[in-house]
Image: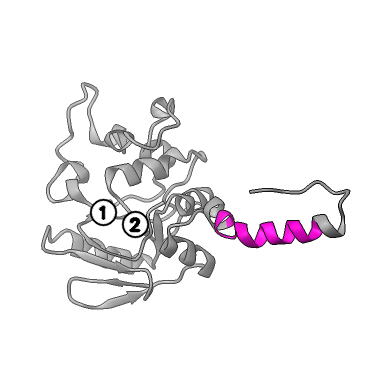
Amino acid sequence: MRPFTTLTGVAAPLRAANVDTDQIIPARFLKTVERTGLGRHLFAGLRYDAEGAERRDFVLNREPYRRAEVLIALENFGCGSSREHAAWALDDFGIRCVIAPSFADIFATNSAKNGLLLVALPRATCEALMADAEMGANARLTVDLERQVVVRPSGEAVAFDIDPGAKARLLEGLDEIGETLARAPAIDRFEAARAAREPWRPAIRL
């Protein structure tokens, strides 16, 4: 998993609430367990018409948002089924941060495990950031995880909250398995001491 420290990039405004995981990545694209190649299917029902042609009015089909690294949406982003492919598709497209007033719990968990930063901010702030984003390529947002701020094109820094454990894992590029493996030497020492003390118990090895 790539570490997330500071990101400066184009932000795409998606003026929609209750964007569910079937909109993010439709069920017909869930036939793979690979994390790559899903970006072309991100928001497929919104990006393409029945013949597969791009819909010109969808934000990610317009410049500069084709190169967006930040997505700004409204309430309850990522609701619906618990498909991890939703986080994979966003990441594969190039989006590393989603800003919205609120997120569905399971989507938030899947995002954290895949290095996707979710920033929850009040709706009024999200609306202001969307207005910034609609200024085009010159209106680049900076998301600084270490400082826990989103910096607007004006220079205003907007603070956000994040769980300290999730922050540490994102900064270090560790999912929960990686965090456990990073502690393997300590676990091995504990298991060796326990084996000497209680030889009848099976040992655990990482």
186 falls in the magenta region: yes
The disc labelled 1 sits on which kind of residue?
Glu
Residue under the point 55% across and 54% down:
176
Residue under the point 39% across and 63% down:
119
163 falls in the magenta region: no
- From the viewer's perspective, tell me whether residue 49 is left or right of residue 19: left
Q: Which residues are magenta?
A: 180-194
Q: Which mark, residue 97?
A: 2
Residue 25 at what x, y percent from top left?
38, 36
Identify the residue under disc 1. 69
Callout 2 environment at 10 Å: few (<14), some (14 to 19), or many (20+)? many
Circle nearer the N terminus (1, 2)? 1
Question: Are circles 1 and 2 on residues that touch, CB within 8 Å?
Answer: yes
Residue 41 at what x, y percent from top left?
30, 33
The foreground one among 99 and 9 is 9
| Predominant secondary structure, magenta span | helix
Residue 121 at what x, y percent from top left?
39, 67
